[in-house]
Image (tube, rainbow, N blue to C red):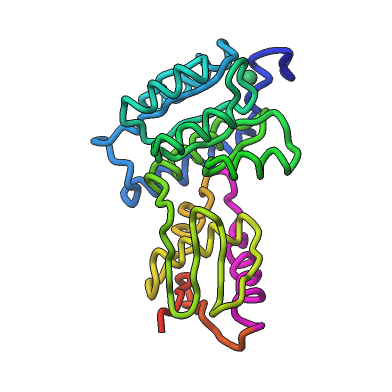
Amino acid sequence: MTLFPTVRGVFRKRSSAARGRRKRLLQHHDNASVFGDDWAVRVLVVEDEVRLASLIRKGLRAEGLLADVAIKGEDALWMAGSSPYDVLTLDLGLSGMDGLEVCRCLRADRVRTPILMLTAREAVEYRIAGLDAGADDYLVKPFDFGELLARLRALARRGPAEHGTVLRVADLALEPASRRVRRGDREVELSTKEFQLLEVFMRHPDQVLTRYQLLERAWDAAYEHRSNVIDVYVRYLREKLDRPFGVESIETVRGTGYRLRAA
Ligand code: CA
């Protein structure tokens, strides 16, 4: 069963203002992008709705990405295991072997390609199940094509999941795989967005990061370009990670952005 009466309905319409804004953003940011013309992102689209799969493939190719499609989970396992994809989109509701199973098998086979889970179910338990199975991000159908693209690029840029890695800056520790954060020996609970923002800071300690860089690396600039969103999340992080511990680790650099102090 599909939740979408027509394929057209799968992609949410983007307003012309949003399209223009995105275009300007991309033009403005072209030089700083790590996606130069010499590197095409390779995507494996795992989707059993044939029309949707071919629509996604077409859309990705139109944007200059390379895209292959696997209709069945078993094919996806074989393809992802034998070709170097930069990122996978994985439909949760596949007929036969489902998305969660595919995800678990890939991770069990040590395939560490970043995985974007696509799900028609918004319920938080499905998202958690997907993340627990080894997915890196998820997107709920129907989605905006620009958002799909942006998230795929962000995941591809992040590279293969580094399981078992712990990032450390001063007495902060962050485990990307398990999504856990500690200050000293106290665990701190963060939302997904807070976590992603902190991860960017911790991968660039002592560097001044602009709001745009933070936005692009943590979530993606194109789908959430609100000028104050970074300020809001930095405030959340300070309230959870700094204030209770009497420290000021995230520094505001006036006119530029923010810096996570390493010392
Ligand atoms: Ca499906």
Stretch in magenta: 223-244
Q: Position of residue 110 (x, y in %)?
A: 39, 39
Ligand 1's quadrant: top right
Quadrant for the N terminus in the image: top right
| Residue at (45, 37) in percent of width and height | 108
Q: Position of residue 187 (x, y in %)?
A: 61, 71
Q: How many marks?
A: 0
| Residue at (54, 57) in percent of width and height | 196
Q: Residue furthest front?
A: 108
> In the figure, residue 130 lies in which quadrant?
top right
| Residue at (40, 19) in percent of width and height | 68
Q: Does the magenta-highlighted stretch encompass residue 232?
A: yes
Quadrant for the C terminus in the image: bottom left
Q: Is residue 252 above or below residue 217?
A: below
Question: Residue 244 vs residue 216: left or right?
Answer: right
Q: Is residue 152 above or below residue 226?
A: above
Q: Is residue 45 above or below residue 25?
A: above
Magenta residues, dominant SS class: helix
Q: Is residue 197 above or below residue 41?
A: below
Q: Residue furthest bottom?
A: 246
Asked whether 48 or 99 is in front, the reply is 99
Q: Does the magenta-highlighted stretch encompass residue 70?
A: no
Q: Position of residue 227 (x, y in %)?
A: 59, 59
Q: Position of residue 10 (x, y in %)?
A: 65, 22
Question: Residue 141 vs residue 181: left or right?
Answer: right
